[in-house]
Amino acid sequence: MFQFFAQELQIVSKTKFSDSRFKIEEGIKKLEEELESLPDPGAPPPIPVMVEPIVQAVLDIKPGLSYVIEESIPQRCFELFKRELDNDRMGMAIVRKAPRQISEFRDLSIKKMIWLTKSQKSDNGHMPIGAIGLGSEDIDEDDYDYISPTELPKLFAEISNFLSGNPGGVVLLEGIEYLLSHSGFKSVLSFSQSLNELMVTREANLIMSLNPESLDAKQTSLLKRDMN
């Protein structure tokens, strides 16, 4: 009887020893794998991988709303404007740079264009200094008007007249900083508020490009308050 229990105890001991040894070996193997995955302290730093920027979500423009696009360099505003024109909408572009210099306007069917400048339209058929440049060379001087940045009432009247003949149209305003520098914040704020109300009544859209660095936080908040 004693010999039988001794043999059973020996078998149990061997089994437990075998299980413990197996667990220890598995633990050592796992630890070695984790150590191999760690970077070598003496190895050179990894070469950074260039990652493409995340594409911005598509903005769903709704009739009657005005949109402020915050960007240091006007680009997104042109993309949105072009997309709306591609959807067979009538468009009006108000820009700081001469339309001939804006490559994004190439092949676009823009109903009306206005260049914000202190230059005057020439009477001899020649374009003033600053109007000539690379870009949409097919845009002739007669294709757009000139308006001074101090003539906000005239600019508003032009936009209102355009929307009267093109209900549901879309207006691009690039150069709000230029208006601010010549007409002051209060005048431009009143102008933008009137534009916002105009878009509502005409079920149109305003796409305004704004460099947030050109204003302080309070001014930016006021300018964006009634817009999207």
Image (spheres, grey):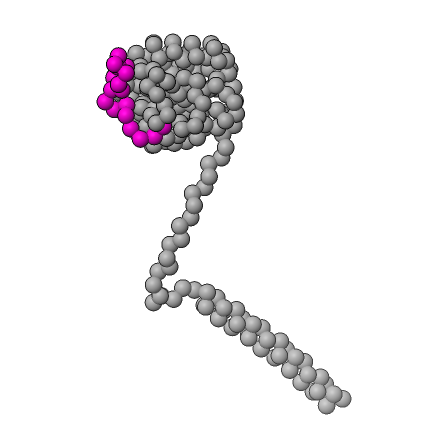
Look at the image and say whether residue 132 sits in the magenta stretch.
yes
Give the left or right position of residue 102, taking residue 118 as reference: right
Give the quadrant of the N terminus. Answer: bottom right
Q: Main secondary structure of the magenta part?
A: loop
Question: Who is closer to the viewer here, 167 or 133?
Answer: 133
Question: Who is closer to the viewer here, 134 or 6?
Answer: 134
- Residue 50 to residue 207: above or below: below
- Residue 41 to residue 170: above or below: below
- Provide the residue span drawn in magenta: 119-136
Give the left or right position of residue 125, taking residue 62 as reference: left
Look at the image and say whether residue 86 sits in the magenta stretch.
no
**Residue that lies at the very extreme toward the left in this rendered image:** 129
Q: Residue at x 29, y 28 (%)?
A: 133
Q: Find residue 82 and report its image quarter.
A: top left
Question: Who is closer to the viewer here, 28 or 218?
Answer: 218
Q: Position of residue 205 (x, y in %)?
A: 47, 19
